[in-house]
Amino acid sequence: MVDAALHGYLVALSLILAIGPQNAFVLRQGIRREHVAAVVAVCAVSDAILIGIGVVGFGAFSAAVPWFGEAMRWAGAAFLLVYGALRFKAALAGGEALVPAAGSGASLGRVLWTCVLLSWANPHVYLDAVVLMGSISAQYAPYGWAFGIAAACGSLTFFAALGFGARLLAPLFARPQAWVVLEVVVGLTMWAIAAALVFG
């Protein structure tokens, strides 16, 4: 059981460390210091639910339905291409549109809606959190539940560190140029992941 829990925690961290739209959003909110606790909570709970679905058998379902993985791959690539394009558009806007909010930031409802969308509408997250985690957890039967709980804890640890630790970068991102660079890097990363899904 301890072995399953340890591996669940480490696998979750290894999968989530890569920069993705969800991580980029948490980072941006952390730097802006806007509704960070709520964003971290939504991301962690969403991951826990998806991991739970994978552990209880969704991974096995995807293995039994061969076209499902292929459909998720193309849908994920399309999602990442669109999100990357939006980041380039934000970079082109530049200036005060990307300055960290001082007084009037985005509303909690708008931030949570964006967070939920990035957490659940990205097909790539289903490949990782549901299909892959579900498949790996099956190797630790009958302790798949320990694997899943530890994986959810790993996700919470990462999002909390990313969201609340991002404020250390606030002095750097007080300059609009730094936000432009961040948006371009995130956009390029999204397109690189999309290319990997299509060609890899």
Image: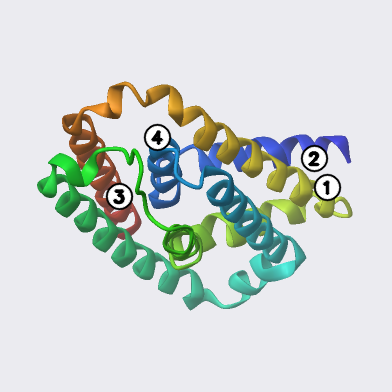
Q: From mark 1 to mark 4, how far is it between C-alphas?
A: 33 Å
Return the disc, 2 or 4, that comes first in the chain's sequence: 2
Q: Secondary structure at mark 3?
A: helix
Q: How many marks?
A: 4
User: What separation in Å lies between label 3 and label 2 (alpha carbons)?
Assistant: 30 Å
Asked whether the beta carbons under mark 3 and mark 2 sit within 8 Å of each other, the answer is no
Instruction: Check contact, mark 1 vs mark 3: CB within 8 A.
Output: no
- The image quadrant where one finds the N terminus is top right
CB within 8 Å, label 2 to label 1: yes
The residues tagged by marks 4 and 3 sit, at their Cα atoms, a distance apart of 20 Å
Q: How is the image coloured?
A: rainbow
Report crowding for label 4: few under 14, some 14 to 19, many 20 or more residues within 10 A (C-alpha): many
Mark 4 vs mark 3: give the one in front.
4
Image location (x, y in percent) of residue 168:
44, 22
- At label 1, counting other C-alpha atoms closer than 10 Å, the crowd grade (few under 14, some 14-19, many 20 or more) is many
Q: Circle 4 is placed at which residue position?
A: 31
- The disc, 2 or 1, on the residue closer to the chain's N-terminal end is 2
Q: Which residue is mark 3?
A: 190
User: In front of the other: label 2 or label 4?
Assistant: 4
Which element is circle 2 on?
helix
Instruction: Identify the residue shown where x is 72% and y is 61%.
Output: 52
Between disc 4 and disc 3, whose residue precedes?
4
Which amino acid, by three-letter code, is at mark 3? Met
Question: Residue beneath label 2, please?
Answer: 5
User: Disc 2 and disc 1: Cα gap in Å?
Assistant: 5 Å
Would you name the residue on which mark 1 appears? 146
Of callouts 1 and 3, the N-terminal one: 1
The answer for how far apart the CA atoms under marks 2 and 4 are is 32 Å
